[in-house]
């Protein structure tokens, strides 16, 4: 029986290795104390995984894989820097409180406040934004 179990497990691992997983985003909390990683696995189905400080805290339900769609997946730290949020398609899908080491309820997830958007200079972009280039056209 154990040989059969070992065989089934090895086949499962082999099949899983055929589906590419890539890191979509790595984002440190504002105080640099915590690190969140968003991974995407494209296989028979499409799934997203959130890893916080080296520990997997979430694996999404399956999405239908469609290379014509931009899923717009991203992770964002909240205003306090204690909660990381996974967004897909512009919607909040999952939240994790790092300090309490637990997922947020759906109700709590919807009321988390994001920090303000960074100023343009904070991006360190060394070019000109299109709207700035248009201002200089005479």
Image (cartoon, rainbow, N blue to C red):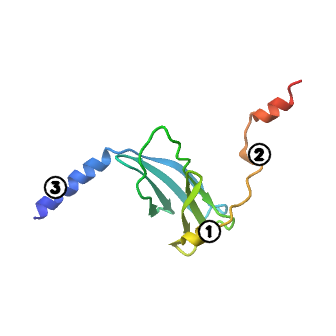
Question: For residue 120, which numbered disc appears in the image?
Answer: 2
Which residue is under mark 1? 82
Q: Element at badge 3?
A: helix
Q: Residue at x 48, y 37 (%)?
A: 68
Q: Element at badge 1?
A: loop
Q: Residue at x 86, y 29 (%)?
A: 136
Q: Is residue 8 left or right of residue 118?
A: left
Q: Residue furthest bottom?
A: 100
**Sequence order check: which comes first, mark 2 or mark 1?**
1
Q: Residue at x 42, y 45 (%)?
A: 65
Instruction: Find residue 51 and report its horizontal and vertical position in percent.
Output: 48, 60
Work out how far the residue at label 2 is from the one at label 1, CA to CA, in angstroms. Answer: 24 Å
Instruction: Find residue 66 and report its horizontal and vertical position in percent.
Output: 44, 41
Which residue is under mark 3? 7
Q: Element at badge 2?
A: helix
Question: In which image quadrant can residue 112 be found?
Answer: bottom right
């Amino acid at each position: 029986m154990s040989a059969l179990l070992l065989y089934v497990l090895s086949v499962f691992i082999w099949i899983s290795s055929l589906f590419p997983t890539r890191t979509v985003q790595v984002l440190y909390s504002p105080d640099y104390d915590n690190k969140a990683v968003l991974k995407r696995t494209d296989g028979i189905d499409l799934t997203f995984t959130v890893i916080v400080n080296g520990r997997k805290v979430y694996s999404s339900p399956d999405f239908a894989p469609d290379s014509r769609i931009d899923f717009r997946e991203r992770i964002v730290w909240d205003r306090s820097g204690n909660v990381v949020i996974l967004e897909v398609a512009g919607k909040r899908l999952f939240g994790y409180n790092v300090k309490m080491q637990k997922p947020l309820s759906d109700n709590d997830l919807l009321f988390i406040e994001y920090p303000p958007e960074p100023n343009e200079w904070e991006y360190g972009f060394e070019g000109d934004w299109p709207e700035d280039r248009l201002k200089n056209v005479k």
